[in-house]
Image (cartoon, grey):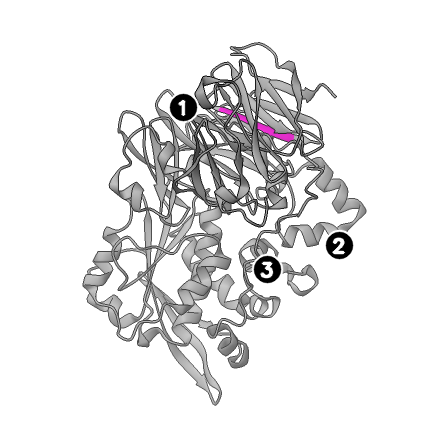
Amino acid sequence: MTTTRLPAALAPWAAALSALTPELAVALGPLLRRLDTLVGEREPVADELGDPDGLGGLARSGRPDRLLPSEWLLADAYPDEFLRRLADGELLHFAPEFRTPATRGRIAALVDTGPTQAGAGRLVQLAALLVLHRRAAARGTSLVVAVLGDPVGKLLTGDLAEVLPAWLNARRPADPTPEEVRDAEEGLAAADRAWLLTSPRLAAQLPSRARVLASEPTRWSAAGATHVTVRLDHQQAELPLPAPEIAVRALRGREFRRVPSPAVAKLPAKVTGGAVPAFTTDARTLLARGPHATTLLAVNLPNTEGGDATVLRARRHELPGPVVAAGRIGRRLIALHLRDDRLVPYVSGRPIAGRGGEPGGFTAGLGDFGLDRGLPDELLTRPVLPLLRDGDDLVLPLAGRWWRIAPDGAVTDDGEAGPGTDGHQPFNRFREARLYERALPPEAARAAHLVHSGATVAWSEDGREWEVRNRQGTPSRIVVRENADVIGLVHHDAVPALVTCTRSARLVRHVRHDAFRTLSAFSGGTAPPAVHPKLPLIAAETRAGRIVVGDAFTGRIHHLIGSDQ
């Protein structure tokens, strides 16, 4: 949103209003501010946190006194650019850390989308969702939306740009009943704070309760409703509605901003342009691509306990062809590289036995993997794929499938693989059900999103709310409250944490059920960091030719790595 079209009175709302067009944001302004005054007494902005524990990194929201000094210098030298960044949520703040954050529930909006709330009622709901979202963000929690009449537990989650279109499309042919209100409340967690957005008719059928916001149109013009009466508990106020023309466009979804797809830069196949580190097996070995597709860098990480960060040198392996998959298997480093439309093994260490027990073997043509048109160029710009050993066979994911390569070169299809084996996105072994140590819980096997580490597993239907079972079987729930991808799962003393990375700023955090920590030392790279499949280790190329490795729980750096080039 351009700041030139945002009135000064709405500047504090810039982050929430970024999901709307500037025209609708300005038109909703009077309704928004007066509704915020009503809601404010019952939904405070501040929430109780634990004891302060210093600063934990950077964030794109926060109090003005936590702005970076460089942002104040920007405000002094280029005030227009400062205002633009403020409106677009691009200013950087110091992020506080807390020693023992209190558990905070979400703010849940139970919305009535029946005929009685059509038109003016939905405009009030839109303003109320913006108000509640802003207050949830200020308290460090999230806003979820439950549509009355939906199955128990079904919630609309995510950023406002995702939630608002889904809320608008959730129209019901009949008004909800008190029983449906109770059903919606049963799908919430005990700590959640529920707000009911409905009509006076349904509100009158419910027992006396707090946080019920009822609205109905009370003044009209020839073009339609101009004012509504809003009742909240024992208070009421008459509030203005936006002009009919823009109100109609808003109710048809034409004034919502679309969610942009994350842009992925396409790199040349022969030069990777980055080390793209990866932990491909359970060993303490970090692999990375060199400046050319035929170069593989490997470093064995010592078990560091305390002390300062150590500088390590990666060993360089020059292969006859582009590296496709690799892994530390026992004392050997084994890689598969491309040569004349065949995958050929490279071994650093004692040779592996092929056909008849003789060295060599494990060579297969690309056609055996369904790659008649050759290997996708993009695959050579991503982290190397994992290469595992199962009995006598080598096992790798490629072209959407898992494959076994026998010592004599025979290739066998071994089942479906997850995304990332065709080069369109990085492969994530955390999401591979077959690599989980135990049998998956039935709910996890059916879930849309899955991550695991050792004997700990987490699953989610929407990528935001995650159910977790640690190695002892103890359940917990972790909520990811920002637009970030889950890139790993780590645990420390039986406490699990998801590792997340935002798509735009590459801000990395570990998120527990009761707190989160910003891993500033591993943020801001050109690609998401690599997380070890079993150990709380994380590696990121923060700048070209420099990889930092450290603890994904504490954020402490253990090693600094460069190649021997």
Is disc 2 surrounded by few (<14), some (14 to 19) or many (20+) residues within 10 Å? some
User: What x and y, as percent, mark residue 236?
Assistant: 37, 67
Q: Is residue 470 visible?
A: yes
Three-letter amino acid code at the position of disc 2? Asp
Is disc 3 surrounded by few (<14), some (14 to 19) or many (20+) residues within 10 Å? some
Q: Residue at x 70, y 37 (%)?
A: 273
**Residue 75 magenta:** no
User: What x and y, as percent, mark residue 381?
Assistant: 63, 39
- The mark that comes first in sequence, 2 or 1, is 2
User: What x and y, as percent, mark residue 171?
Assistant: 35, 71
Q: Which residue is mark 3?
A: 10
Give the residues drawn in magenta, as a range: 537-541
Q: Which residue is mark 2?
A: 80
Is residue 264 shown above or below 171? above
- The mark that comes first in sequence, 1 or 3, is 3
Is residue 204 shown above or below 469? below
Camera-side residue: 163 or 206?
Answer: 163
Disc 2 vs disc 1: which is toward the camera?
1
Q: Which quarter shows the C terminus? A: top right
User: What x and y, as percent, mark residue 116?
Assistant: 31, 76
Three-letter amino acid code at the position of disc 1? Asp
Q: Which residue is mark 1?
A: 392
Residue 523 placement, left or right of 71: left
